[in-house]
Image (cartoon, helix red, strand yellow):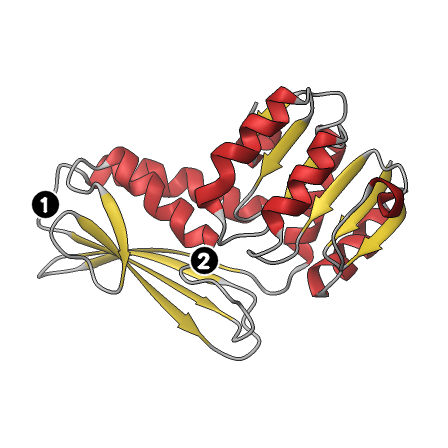
Amino acid sequence: MRIALVGYGKMGKIIEEVAQKRGHSIVAQLNETPTLENLNNPDVAIEFSNPEASFENSRICLQNQIPVICGTTGWLDQKPEIEKIAVENNSAFLYGSNFSLGVNLFFALNEKLADLMKNFPEYQVQLEEIHHTHKKDAPSGTAITLAEGIIKNDPRFDAWKLEETKDHQLGIFALREDEVPGTHSVFYKSDVDEIEIKHTAFNRNGFALGAVIAAEWIQGKKGNFSMKDVLFN
């Protein structure tokens, strides 16, 4: 494939390395707003930029019928509009809050556990995420996906919030520490014991590999997708 990297920071450079090892060509490395010219006729754009730029980056690609794999978090209030643009332009958009295979298995485990625990109100639920100090958004997109998985399966909750769980709001603690790629934990705590599930990323390579696999998968497809479509369908 011919891949345009829209956002060429730490993640972009790792994605470049992984993609080239899998036989793909990098035809653009952009930290500026994409245009039809500087995108250089790619088969797909992989967008890891920042919350302020992500919507416009994706819009330009989709309106030029370039499929987009987007891993930027912190802009999801605009995601429905981008998904509409993808359909209107007969293109394809795939958003992932986390492209790691392990994390996507963790998402499925989290939903299964939430479904099991919904009938045991003596257990209080709490989420925690730890990331490097350079991460701009809080909570992480991965933590939000975990929270949404619990909310979907446990009628006690109808929303998430930063800090501790309160009433019908599921709490997420967002911690920032030096050079932590990403650690996510879900706790179910009662007066007598605690159940914890946890995913720890050792580096960013798993995220990059998942993004490239998603880019390979989306070729020839039209519409809006997630990593669940790539891995489980």
The reply to whether dot 1 and dot 2 touch (C-beta < 8 Å) is: no
Look at the image and tell me in which quarter the N terminus lies: top right
Is any part of residue 86 visible from this angle? yes
Residue under label 2: 140
Cα separation, mark 1 vs mark 2, equals: 26 Å
Query: Can you see residue 229?
Result: no
Residue at x-position 68% and y-position 23%? 89
The percent position of residue 129, horizontal first and vertical second, equals 40, 63
Q: Amino acid at mark 2?
A: Ser
Left or right of residue 18: residue 107: left
Looking at the picture, tell me which residue is in the foreground, 173 or 55.
Answer: 55
Residue 31 drawn above or below residue 145: below
Q: Position of residue 187 (x, y in %)?
A: 27, 57
Q: Residues within 10 Å of mark 1 (few under 14, many from 20)?
A: few
**Residue 145 image position (x, y, % from top left):** 41, 45
Residue 152 lies, with reference to residue 133, above or below; the image says: above
Residue projecting furthest to the bottom: 178
Q: Earlier in the sequence, mark 1 or mark 2?
A: 1
Q: Which mark is residue 121?
A: 1
194 with respect to 106 (left or right): left
Say which amino acid is labelled 1.
Pro
